[in-house]
Structures are given as C-alpha cells and as structure tokens.
Image (cartoon, helix red, strand yellow):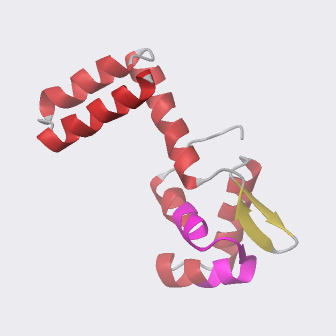
Amino acid sequence: MSEYKLGVIESRFAEIIWNNEPLTSSELAKLALSELDWKKSTTYTVLKRLCDRGIFINENGTVRSLISKKDFYALQSEKFVDETFSGSLPAFVAAFSSRKKLSDDEIEQLQHMIDNMRR
C-alpha cells in the first residue's frame, strides 16, 4: 500500500467497490457504467491503478479490497493531521472548532472517546 491518496473520481470508484465487494470485474464494469458513465476500458485502467497502489486486488476476475474503507480513511486522517498539524490532534481540533462550533453532542462524544482511551 504505497499510495493511500485518492482523487475525487477515484474515491467514487473505490466506494463502488467497498459497497459491493467482493464482485467480479465485469460486475464492477457494469456498476461503473451506470454510476460513473465509464467505459469498460476506463474501469479496468482505474482498477489497475488502485490495485498497483495496494488498495484493491483483482484476483481471478474477483475484485476485493486489501484495506477496508474505515482503515483507509483512518490512515488518510492520520496523514492529514501529521502533515498539517505536525501530528498534533489537539491543534487540529482547535483549528477545526475555531471555525465550526462543536455541538454539545459532539463535545460529549469526544469526551466519551477520551474517557475510553484513558481506561
């Protein structure tokens, strides 16, 4: 998994795979046609690119993920905080909450997460 970054269109394509896996490459091509208006050749080109990055695998015509959607986006979040806030989660939360007021429910959820991490 050398490259964890996805563009907007690649993300939409990855969502199709994550939401339907495992699926055959021909089923994927049909879904990409209906949801993205892609030709089969475009589907296979993008699939190969994402397989080369180690996110998905196309084995004997069956496509599945090598990394779950949840884990992929967790890694993206970690990378963003590392690169943008020198790895400081408090700095990220401070920047985020300076422009968007956190609701009482969000604050409660964050406090619950913190409490669970302390245990």
Q: Residue 95's image quarter?
A: top left
Question: In the displayed structure, does residue 83 sit left or right of residue 108?
Answer: right
Q: Residue furthest right?
A: 60
Give the camera-side residue of 108 and 41: 108
Quadrant housing the N terminus: top right
- What span is in magenta? 14-30
Q: Position of residue 76 (x, y in %)?
A: 50, 38
Q: Position of residue 23 (x, y in %)?
A: 70, 76
Residue 103 visible in this rendered orientation of the protein: no
Q: Position of residue 117 (x, y in %)?
A: 44, 26
Residue 59 visible in this rendered orientation of the protein: yes
Question: In the displayed structure, does residue 22 sit left or right of residue 90?
Answer: right
The verdict on residue 23 being magenta is yes
Give the camera-side residue of 118 and 31: 118
- In this rendering, the answer to whether 24 lies above or below 87 is below
Q: Residue 96's image quarter?
A: top left
The verdict on residue 72 being magenta is no
Give the camera-side residue of 36 and 100: 100
Residue that appears at 30% across and 17% down: 91
Is most of the magenta stretch helix, strand or loop? helix
Q: Position of residue 81 (x, y in %)?
A: 42, 25
Q: Residue furthest front?
A: 119
Residue that appears at 17% across and 43% down: 105
